[in-house]
Image (spheres, rainbow, N blue to C red):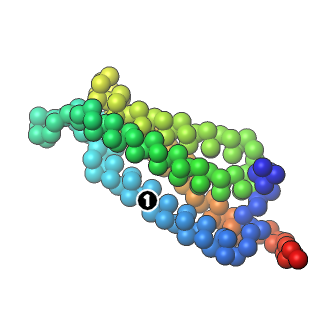
Amino acid sequence: MRYFNGRSQLARMDFNTRLIMTYFLVFMLAAAALSIYMSYQKTQLSVRGAAEYYRGSEQGMSFPKEEAELIETSHFHLFIMPMVFLTTGHLFLLSAWSRRWKTFVISSCFVYIALDVAKPWLVRYLGAGWGALAPVNSALLGLTMLLCILVPIYEMWFLPEQRREVPPVS
């Protein structure tokens, strides 16, 4: 855990390590953008759109989401989203940001994941008003994801910190 201090460890990494991490982060950025677009297509990222998507709509001729479908979606999200944030979050923790900000961003990530998993259940079974989570949580989750992706990319490639050469182990 000595690597998660106040100095950027990202700028000091080997070129190929930075390269593979950057490739991963670029794919995560594309996946996040596609996820937001997919949510927009389903709900228009609006309270009304989320309510109609999960609760059904006579005008849109759609049925309410069934419990089995909500379980399947929750199951997938509970596995994949924490893994994505575990990886991107660890890279973010290697940044030069203060411990307080790192704690805030990482904690926010997991709160927004929990709300994202809970959102369909809340909208479907407790009320359409919970659809407000669609635009708000998507924006906040997207922002924290952007921080966990863009901060490491910036620090790996653009932070003006002198790189320390580590001598090879004999």
Q: Residue at x 57, y 58 (%)?
A: 149
Residue 67 placement: quadrant: top left
Residue 77 placement: quadrant: top left
64 versus 89 height, above or below:
above
Would residue 24 be visible to someone looking at this image? yes
Q: Is residue 21 left or right of residue 63?
A: right
On the image, numbered disc 1 is attached to which residue? 31
Q: Residue furthest top?
A: 126
* Spot occupied by residue 123 in the image (x, y as percentages of width and height): 32, 30
Would residue 48 be visible to someone looking at this image? no
Q: Residue at x 20, y 33 (%)?
A: 64
User: Is residue 47 or residue 168 the one in the foreground?
Assistant: 168
Secondary structure, mark 1, is helix
Q: Residue at x 47, y 49 (%)?
A: 80
* Spot occupied by residue 133 in the image (x, y as percentages of width and height): 40, 35
36 versus 43 height, above or below:
below
* Spot occupied by residue 111 in the image (x, y as percentages of width and height): 54, 36
* Spot occupied by residue 24 in the image (x, y as percentages of width and height): 55, 65
Q: Residue at x 39, y 41 (%)?
A: 75
Q: Is residue 170 left or right of residue 159?
A: right
* Image quarter (top left, top right, bottom left or bottom right) of the C terminus: bottom right
Q: Residue furthest front?
A: 170
Which amino acid does the dot numbered 1 rest on?
A: Ala
